[in-house]
Image (spheres, rainbow, N blue to C red):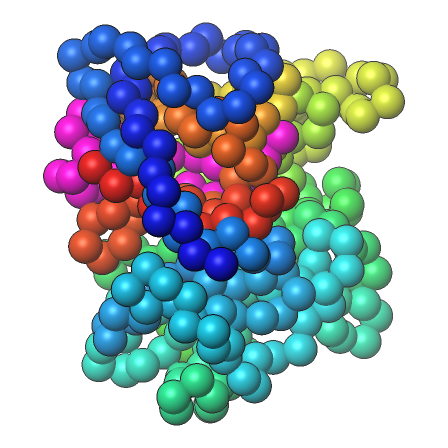
Amino acid sequence: MFYQFALLFSLGVAACSANTSNEPADGINEATTTAADTTSFKVVKLYEDLSNPWGMTWLSDGRMLVTERNGDILVFKGDKFTGEKLSGVPKVVAQGQGGLLDIQTHPAYAQNGWIYITYSKPMPGGSSTAVTRFKLQGNQVVNAEDVFVAKPALNADYHFGSRIVWDKAGFMYVSVGERGTQPKVQQLDNDHGKIHRIYDDGRIPEDNPFAKQAGASKSIWTYGHRNPQGMVYDAAGNRIWAIEHGPKGGDELNLIEPGKNYGWPKTSYGINYDGTILTKDKELAGVTNPVRYWVPSIAPCGMAIVTSDRYPGWKGNLLVGALSFRYVARVQLDGAGYKGEEKLLENIGRVRHVAQSPDGYIYVLTEGPGQLIKLQP
């Protein structure tokens, strides 16, 4: 069912402290505010019959692909669902938090036709976060091949990660959750709780920080992560930002730099879900502190960086999905630091992903209800 109605928002800056605890308002916030960089836009609901959507990407022929965690990839064109799905998608383990996750095209997709997905791959011993690339013949998946599979496989059905980004040099970065293996996150002989850097075909760059370290997984770029479910490449700063779920409190925004340890589970601004102390340390020598943390947890998932001129005052900002508080956080940066924050689309649904299209528009995926939303200036 398609929806052509729109709600007009005129939203301004509302800077928040690192310990924001405001509950989301009932209903969508239609209040107007005034600020120097106010940006007005319409919220257009394009489709609202999605089942646990996770990722989206655009093809050079104008089609958009949207993943659902159950393993389906839906085809949209002209902002409308075509009624078609891709066939031949690799089998996923759609249990717990597992299933079909992110989807991204190769930076040179128009020339080589490669599409990449992350998912929980069935394996002996359980499942693991994997990256497969494939091409399309019409809506049929062809030439599918694994380029990365996190090791070892585990029986846990949670904390898979996972997002893909590309830098300007053509390297691919893959975020992988810790799968509940807390002590192992600080060890380099496994792939969990890490962000990995590889070539587009899965080869490992020789200048990765641990490529020459005996016993280390050569693809590791950074470690000490809990469950990073959002990541973007900031081309203007030639840097990568990632968001990750904390435990009860302590969700993080991190600036990702090679070889660094981001602390989990040695440091955290959160506590265990039963209220007990996870660790007494919020900071430690040798651990890179988050640029921003959220207490209580917003459950950050999916992130875009605004490079478009269509949204005045937002350029260079991060748009972060909030699952638990059901809004999009517009995070303003001050260089490599945190400047302030504004809540957009309050109570719109559990925001799973935010992305910017090739023509500069912002799209949002929500679950409960499962919606595809466009922010129309």
Task: Using the image, determine if residue 314 lies above or below residue 352.
Answer: above
Q: Nearer the viewer, residue 152 or 94?
A: 94
Read off the magenta span.
301-324
In the image, taking residue 206 as reference, residue 49 lies left or right, namely: right
Task: Using the image, determine if residue 88 lies above or below residue 159.
Answer: below
Point 13% across, 39% down: residue: 309
**x, y percent for residue 275:** 83, 17
Point 49% across, 29% down: residue: 327
**x, y percent for residue 162:** 55, 54
Answer with the quarter of the image where residue 56 lies: bottom left
| Count of numbered badges drawn on the protein | 0
- Taking the magenta stretch, the answer to whether it contains residue 317 is yes
In the image, taking residue 314 as reference, residue 346 lies left or right, namely: right
Q: Nearer the viewer, residue 306 or 146?
A: 306
Q: Is residue 79 visible?
A: yes
Answer with the quarter of the image where residue 139 lies: bottom left
Answer with the quarter of the image where residue 224 lies: top right
**x, y percent for residue 189:** 67, 57
Image quadrant holding the C terminus, namely: top left
Task: Using the image, determine if residue 68 lies above or below residue 276.
Answer: below
Point 48% across, 86% down: residue: 141
Q: Nearer the viewer, residue 267 or 147?
A: 147
Point 30% across, 29% down: residue: 8
Q: Nearer the viewer, residue 269 or 220?
A: 269
Q: Is residue 116 visible?
A: no
- Taking the magenta stretch, the answer to whether it contains residue 281 is no
